[in-house]
Amino acid sequence: MSSLECRKTFLEVVPSSCWFPTVRRSKSCTALGDCLVETVADTRADDLLRRLACSFAWESDWPEGISSGSLGHPFLCKAPCIRAVHGTCMKGPRCEFCHLEHNHPKRKLRRQERQRLEEMPELLVLLILHWHIQRHVTNLRLEDDLQLVLAVLERRVKLLREARRPTHAELRWAMENLWTLRGFSLGRLFDAFQLWPQVDSDFKREVKFLVDSARKGMATPRAA
Ligand SMILES: [Zn+2]
Ligand SMILES: [Zn+2]
């Protein structure tokens, strides 16, 4: 006698001599027993790891709650981190934005103001930048921290002046736009400067290096 039997995904005609009750097939699953034995797990490795984790301490002299962007706070730090305000910044000390409190909302340049600065010759924007930086450095008594930055800025202005003397009209143009950068912190002045397309890129790199060094040298960020 033959019967129809479902084997895997096929229906197959099985001769009676091969026919056996389904119970018999289930008997072949002895391996399961071996798996169950495995659950009496060897926990030695886990115990060891747990002991190691308990005795491990992160050793860092990095002040708690600040990021790399907080260096130089509140004068020379980077723009505030929006995520840190909401407690969702996952970058921690590696974040390039400032994690400390900023009391004054940052002033944004209007599109026309930004365009006006970008249209000026390099010498004129550097004159404006130097005027603001010098003012902050004097007010905040940061002469020692930023003397190198000021020196390279003055050297660049001198070089450009010698290459082509600005006309009276150009100097008046710079004076009229002097206050465009009002309300900018030192850190933001240096950030804005990096975006000006007319400024020589090697000079930008040099200033960035010196400003970053000054920020690192300003040790623990000061309270706002
Ligand atoms: Zn800051
Ligand atoms: Zn952040």
Image: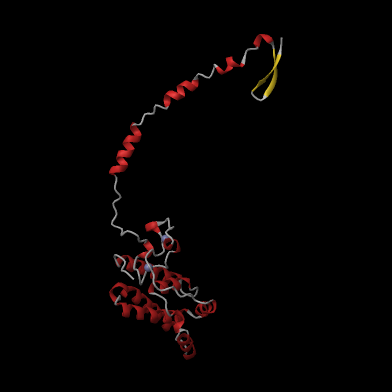
In the image, taking residue 59 as reference, residue 188 lies left or right, namely: right
Quadrant in the picture for residue 134: bottom left
State whether residue 158 appears in this view: no
User: Residue 100: x and y, percent?
Assistant: 37, 65
User: Residue 170: x and y, percent?
Assistant: 48, 87
Q: Is residue 90 above or below residue 13?
A: below
Q: Is residue 79 above or below residue 14?
A: below
Quadrant in the picture for residue 15: top right
In the image, taking residue 90 as reference, residue 59 lies left or right, namely: left
State whether residue 131 appears in this view: yes
> Which one is nearer the viewer's eye here, 151 or 41?
41
Taking the view exactly as shown, the residue that stands out farthest to the bottom is: 168
> Which one is nearer the viewer's eye here, 66 or 96?
66
Q: Quadrant of the N terminus?
A: top right
Quadrant in the picture for residue 20: top right
**At x 42% / y 83%, what residue is drawn?**
161
User: Residue 202: x and y, percent?
Assistant: 43, 69
> Which one is nearer the viewer's eye here, 90 or 181?
90
Q: Quadrant of the C terminus?
A: bottom left
**At x 36% / y 29%, what residue is drawn?**
42
User: Residue 193: x and y, percent?
Assistant: 44, 73
